[in-house]
């Protein structure tokens, strides 16, 4: 009988011939299945959008959009995950097998087919000498894919798409497409025109066009400013509610009619409103 082993990931006892315990093997399967059903398809979408953006660049004549780094990041991550899967396939001798430049066996199958095969042979995978490291790699990569593809409530209204702003709608007005992104994101894709947007640039342009950090407006005009700049339907009453709830600490009253509004607070209000509107649908 084989000696008892402990799980390379969590230290619990493992079944005979395995380097990982049942729990960790189950978790590994969950990660792989998530990559198959959600993670990789979502990542592929992001990589795909790069192509449409590239096509648009010459028309807009904007060199800043020519090589958007976030696309390359998504593409590189996609490739890294696929190689990771191919190397695991190679260790199980899943045909067809090629070799990489380090001489490592690498199954030459596409990621989705490969994940299905790996899920069927997870027991063998968990028996590999390096199972602990492989499982750790899968987890790390799945979390990277998750971070690269998740659309969460953390997304904030950043500004409007400058490319859409150059276009006109049927009434001859500039098209204002609101752009949402996570606070930590550096780039986003316009949902209307597909342009790659440098969010720092958008934020700065936004502030500049609005006279830096504050605008002096009546309550009704501040609400109109938000509607014009974000397309979100905010009313003066919404702003009054926000102030009374202490959500606009940097906004100051100037006289009976005018307020000095903090732009970030106005945008946060619009964000809140947009989320509630979406929630109602
Ligand atoms: Zn374990
Ligand atoms: Zn746009």
Image (spheres, rainbow, N blue to C red):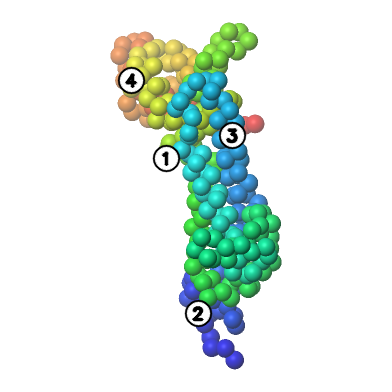
Instruction: Give the percent coordinates (x, y) of residue 80.
Output: 52, 53
Q: Secondary structure at mark 1?
A: loop
Q: Which residue does the numbered mark 1 point to in the structure image?
A: 184
User: For numbered disc 2, what is the local secondary structure?
Assistant: loop
Point out residue 177 in the picture as x, y percentages from the top left corner.
54, 23
Q: In the displayed structure, does residue 148 sit left or right of residue 256?
A: right
Q: Quadrant of the C terminus?
A: top right
Secondary structure beneath disc 4?
A: loop
At label 1, counting other C-alpha atoms closer than 10 Å, the crowd grade (few under 14, some 14-19, many 20 or more) is few
- For label 4, being within 8 Å of ligand 2 is answered no
Residue 141 showing in the rendered view:
yes
Circle 2 is placed at which residue position? Answer: 6
Specify few, some or many for label 4: CA neighbours under 10 Å numbering under 14, 14-19, or 20 or more.
few
- Quadrant assignment for the N terminus: bottom right
Label 3's element?
Answer: helix
Which residue sits at x=48%, y=43%?
A: 73
For marks 1 and 2, the one nearer the N-term is 2
Q: CA distance from mark 2 to mark 4?
A: 60 Å
Q: Residues within 10 Å of mark 2 (few under 14, many from 20)?
A: some
Residue behind label 2 places its C-beta within 8 angstroms of ligand 1: no
Cα–Cα gap, marks 2 and 3: 47 Å
Q: Earlier in the sequence, mark 3 or mark 1?
A: 3
The residue pinned by badge 3 equals 51
* Residue 251 x/y as whole percent: 34, 23
Q: Is residue 272 visible?
A: no
Q: Is residue 159 left or right of residue 17?
A: left
**Which numbered disc covers residue 212?**
4
**Residue 171 vertical placement versus 181 (above, below):** above
């Amino acid at each position: 009988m084989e000696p008892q082993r402990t799980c390379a990931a969590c230290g619990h006892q493992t079944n005979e011939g395995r380097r990982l315990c049942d729990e960790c093997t189950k978790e590994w399967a969950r990660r792989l299945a998530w990559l198959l059903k959600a993670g990789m398809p979502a990542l592929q979408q992001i990589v795909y959008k790069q192509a449409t953006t590239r096509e648009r660049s010459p028309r807009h004549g904007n060199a800043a959009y020519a090589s958007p780094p976030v696309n390359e990041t998504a593409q590189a991550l996609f490739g890294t995950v696929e190689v990771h899967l191919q190397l695991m396939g190679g260790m199980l001798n899943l045909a067809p097998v090629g070799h990489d430049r380090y001489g490592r066996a690498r199954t030459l199958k596409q990621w989705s087919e490969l994940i299905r095969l790996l899920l069927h042979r997870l027991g063998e995978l968990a028996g590999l000498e390096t199972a602990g490291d492989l499982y750790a790699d899968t987890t790390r990569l799945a979390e990277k894919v998750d971070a690269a593809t998740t659309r969460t409530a953390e997304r904030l209204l950043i500004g409007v798409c400058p490319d859409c702003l150059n276009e006109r709608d049927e009434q001859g007005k500039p098209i204002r497409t609101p752009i949402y992104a996570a606070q930590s994101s550096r780039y986003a894709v316009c949902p209307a025109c597909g342009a790659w947007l440098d969010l720092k640039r958008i934020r700065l342009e936004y502030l500049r066009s609005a006279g830096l950090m504050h605008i002096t407006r009546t309550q009704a005009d501040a609400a109109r400013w938000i509607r014009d700049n974000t397309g979100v339907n905010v009313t003066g009453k919404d702003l009054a509610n926000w102030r009374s709830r202490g959500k606009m600490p940097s906004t100051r009253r100037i006289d009976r009619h005018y307020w000095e509004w903090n732009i970030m607070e106005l945008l946060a209000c619009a964000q809140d409103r947009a989320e509630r509107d979406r929630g109602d649908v």
